[in-house]
């Protein structure tokens, strides 16, 4: 790995504020006498941003890998509380210096439209009084990961993480599934009030940030902060309604079929993961090393360079895949703009979901590599609707090579069916989580009881009446607490829905003409965020569209593909 720096000293580390301040002072005080000098200044700032973002990234990654090490959490919190607030003040100064430069007009307006638009929005939203609130919010957001990482249950005389315990929900013995479901949910319920209090504190902080910036509520502020230039609140509501009309009935059909196949009088929430023909759970790999090696082979079969990307990550130690006690939940791909090698973090326990997760995060990694040569970090900082298009498309594209994991044809069909049904199941959940967050922030002073009622109403709206929650109402009312995004990255979730629709369209193109679809897909990923979302989707050969007509069309396509797997 060779990090190239032209402005920041190649041996520079950050132990305190004084280590970074001289570079920011240089950028603030430097005289700019031409458009060439402005562009050079911008590239130096971009290098500084990449250096700072990677520094924080590693602190976050290391803390996530071991939440029990106080030194790692202290290191992250130091950066968030002592470095980032000061950088934020400089950022506003530098933004204004750039935008007010008389030489800006001489830069290519089409080429730099996206980052200039973003910088203008940053200036519009910046409030000095919010700096300390951001630091407080970031530290508060880490409470969720720490709380959930400490959750374990004991089953069959073994203490295990909730992720590992989740494998038993695929067990063919219904009593085992029921027991483990109750153990998992009771453990979550034990921290119900703690997580509720944490979210209440976060909502309060976020509401103050919004009001300081001149907004009536955090939802509207966050739409601006997320720079959702290409769609608005009404479009999200259209998405909610489209999912309710065209996807929820389809999901009901899937659950009716499952209930019949399992010969059940009532389909309970612990009956949703077991194979619908009551076959033993699929075991696609036994160790995280095997998961990685097989994933490299899958990616290489799609295109050799995709496998090479994962090999580079393996050689440099940029993966942490297995679940263990004390490790943060979930999975992510963290782009590192200096190394230009992303880091993949997952919690693999040996099931199909782990394969799907690594295909997903691997799609993000491919995106990071393909966009690594862009000249400014501004182009690499992807909007989520574009980033998730890469990951969700790769989940579907990779199915063409899943025989690497499943030599048995029946197992392969089961895996593909699970993936497609999972896509359909997640769309109502996405709409549910998004609508729930709208409600949370439009009434920020709500009580815990009203919060439960909000969730209960939205969950019934987008859920399936086929699933019988009798006896488990308290778990149903607090099921939102398992969604990390609500705590750590508010409103970052509907992007998955938009991108899932795009991914289905990419996959449809892939099945019709593999090479053309992959070429279009790659060309879109290479753009990073240098074009608008609709333009990027168009380059990928698809539409950025969430109308009822388009969703209906895509759902009919997925139905037809599911029919082939019977």
Image (cartoon, rainbow, N blue to C red):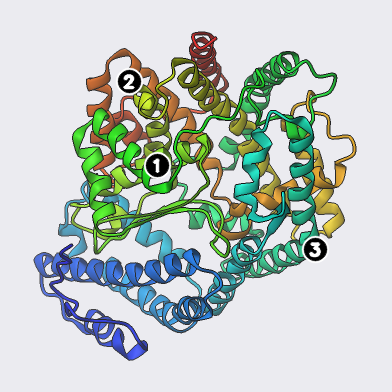
Judged left or right of residue 361, residue 329 is right
> Along the polypeptide, which appears first: circle 2 or circle 1?
1
Answer whether labels 2 and 1 touch (C-beta < 8 Å): no
User: Which label is found at residue 291?
Assistant: 1
Query: Which one is closest to the eye, mark 3 or mark 1?
Result: 1
Where is mark 2, residue-wise?
510
Left/right of residue 63 with respect to residue 55 in the rendered view: right
Query: Relative to 285, is 10 above or below?
Result: below
Q: Is residue 234 above or below residue 565?
A: below
State how far apart marks 3 and 1 are (Cα).
Answer: 37 Å
Is 523 rendered above or below residue 264? Answer: below
Residue 203 image point, x, y percent: 68, 63
Q: Which residue is mark 3?
A: 193
As rendered, which of 90 and 452 lies closer to the eye? 452
In depth, the one of 166 and 239 nearer the eye is 166
Apparent side of residue 265 relative to residue 37 in the rendered image (left or right) = right
Q: Residues within 10 Å of mark 3 (few under 14, many from 20)?
A: few
Asked which quadrant contains residue 147, the reply is: bottom right
């Amino acid at each position: 790995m060779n990090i190239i720096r032209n402005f920041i000293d190649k041996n520079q580390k950050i132990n305190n504020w004084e280590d970074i301040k001289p570079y920011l002072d240089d950028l603030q005080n430097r005289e700019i006498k031409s458009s060439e000098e402005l562009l050079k200044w911008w590239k130096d700032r971009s290098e500084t941003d990449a250096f700072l973002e990677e520094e924080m990234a590693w602190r976050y990654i290391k803390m996530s890998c071991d939440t029990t090490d106080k030194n790692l959490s202290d290191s992250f919190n130091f950066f968030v509380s002592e470095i980032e607030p000061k950088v934020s003040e400089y950022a506003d100064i530098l933004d204004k210096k750039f935008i007010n430069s008389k030489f800006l007009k001489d830069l290519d307006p089409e080429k730099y439209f996206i980052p200039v638009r973003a910088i203008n929005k940053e200036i519009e939203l910046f409030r000095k009084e919010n700096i300390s609130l951001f630091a407080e919010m970031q530290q508060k957001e880490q409470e969720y990961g720490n709380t959930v990482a400490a959750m374990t249950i004991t089953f069959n005389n073994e203490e295990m993480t909730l992720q590992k315990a989740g494998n038993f929900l695929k067990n063919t013995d219904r009593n085992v599934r029921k027991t483990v479901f109750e153990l998992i949910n009771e453990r979550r319920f034990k921290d119900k009030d703690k997580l509720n209090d944490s979210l209440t504190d976060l909502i309060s902080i976020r509401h103050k940030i919004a009001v300081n910036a001149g907004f009536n509520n955090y939802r509207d502020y966050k739409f601006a902060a997320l720079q959702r230039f290409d769609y608005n609140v009404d479009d999200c509501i259209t998405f909610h309604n489209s999912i309710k009309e065209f996807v929820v009935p389809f999901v009901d059909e899937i659950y009716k079929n499952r209930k019949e196949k399992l010969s059940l009088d009532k389909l309970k929430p612990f009956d949703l993961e077991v194979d619908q023909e009551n076959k033993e759970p699929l075991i696609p790999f036994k160790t995280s090393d095997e998961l990685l090696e097989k994933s490299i082979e899958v990616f290489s079969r799609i295109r050799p360079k995709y496998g090479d990307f994962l090999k580079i990550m393996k050689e440099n130690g940029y993966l942490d895949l297995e679940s263990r006690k004390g490790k943060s939940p979930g999975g992510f791909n963290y782009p590192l703009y200096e190394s230009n090698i992303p880091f993949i973090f997952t919690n693999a326990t040996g099931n199909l979901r782990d394969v799907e997760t690594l295909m997903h995060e691997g799609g993000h990694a491919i995106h990071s590599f393909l966009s690594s040569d862009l000249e400014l970090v501004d182009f690499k900082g992807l909007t989520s609707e574009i980033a998730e298009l890469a990951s969700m498309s790769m989940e579907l594209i990779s199915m063409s090579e899943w025989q690497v994991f499943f030599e048995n044809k029946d197992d392969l069909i089961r895996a593909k069916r699970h993936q497609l049904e999972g896509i359909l199941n997640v769309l109502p959940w996405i709409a549910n989580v998004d609508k729930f967050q709208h409600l949370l922030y439009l009434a920020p002073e709500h009580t815990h009881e009203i919060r439960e009622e909000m969730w209960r109403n939205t969950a019934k709206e987008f859920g399936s009446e086929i699933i019988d929650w009798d006896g488990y109402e308290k778990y149903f009312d607090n099921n939102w607490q398992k969604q990390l995004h609500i705590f750590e990255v508010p409103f970052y979730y509907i992007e998955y829905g938009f991108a899932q629709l795009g991914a289905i369209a990419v996959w449809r193109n892939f099945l019709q003409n593999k090479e053309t679809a992959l070429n279009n897909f790659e060309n879109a990923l290479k753009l990073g965020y240098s074009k608008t979302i609709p333009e990027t989707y168009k380059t990928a050969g698809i539409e950025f569209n969430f109308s009822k007509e388009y969703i209906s069309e895509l759902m009919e396509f997925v139905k037809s593909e599911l029919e082939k797997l019977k």
